[in-house]
Amino acid sequence: MKPHYFLLSSAILFLLASFLISPFDLTLNVDTYFIIPVTHFLRCSAVGLLLFAAFYKCLNHYLVSKMLTWIHVLSLLLFPLIIALMSYSFNKSLAVVEISDQGTSSFFGRHHRTNHIILSTLIVMQILPVLNIIFGVMNRHKRNIK
């Protein structure tokens, strides 16, 4: 299966899920406390997947590595799942801190560090298509010179 078809089908599933899932909020705590309705999150994720599907469809001939492409595609699909898990763990942690006498500052410090590492990794993963195109264009240029 080609990456753009996979992203297109995933975007359609995200859009369908945004209409079928009962509404609830995702809560993210990364220096600031964000409350995002899951329907908005799924629809924005679907639009992002559609944009990357168009990107991979149009620039498929310039990509040098299928492995980099699929790593990026999988990271795009894992991003909403990871955000949902982060929201769930944060909500669970609030409940644990409220009913117990755990050290809240160290607990939230670990939670913040984990969130920053995960989000930083996901942001860095967005460099992969740019590198893939740069190396692909350089490779095509070398072939045209010979």
Image (cartoon, rainbow, N blue to C red):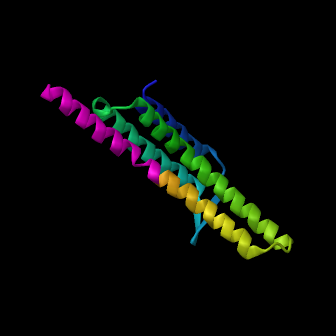
Q: Is residue 100 left or right of residue 6?
A: right
Kindly tell me whether residue 89 is visible in this rendering.
Answer: yes
Kindly tell me whether residue 27 is visible in this rendering.
Answer: no
Q: Is residue 113 magenta?
A: no
Q: Which residues are magenta?
A: 124-146
Quadrant into which the C terminus falls: top left
Q: Residue furthest right?
A: 100
Residue 11 position in % (x across, y down)? 48, 39
Residue 88 position in % (x across, y down)? 70, 57
Residue 87 position in % (x across, y down)? 65, 58
* Residue shown at the point (58%, 59%) measured from the top left: 37
* Residue shown at the point (82%, 72%) measured from the top left: 102
Return the residue nearer the eye: 3 or 36. 3
Q: In the displayed structure, would residue 106 be above or below residue 47?
A: below
Residue 18 position in % (x across, y down)? 57, 47
Return the residue nearer the eye: 85 or 48. 85
Q: In the displayed structure, would residue 25 be above or below residue 82?
A: below
Residue 97 found in image quarter: bottom right
Residue 143 found in image quarter: top left
Q: Magenta stretch: dominant SS?
A: helix
* Residue shown at the point (46%, 34%) measured from the top left: 70
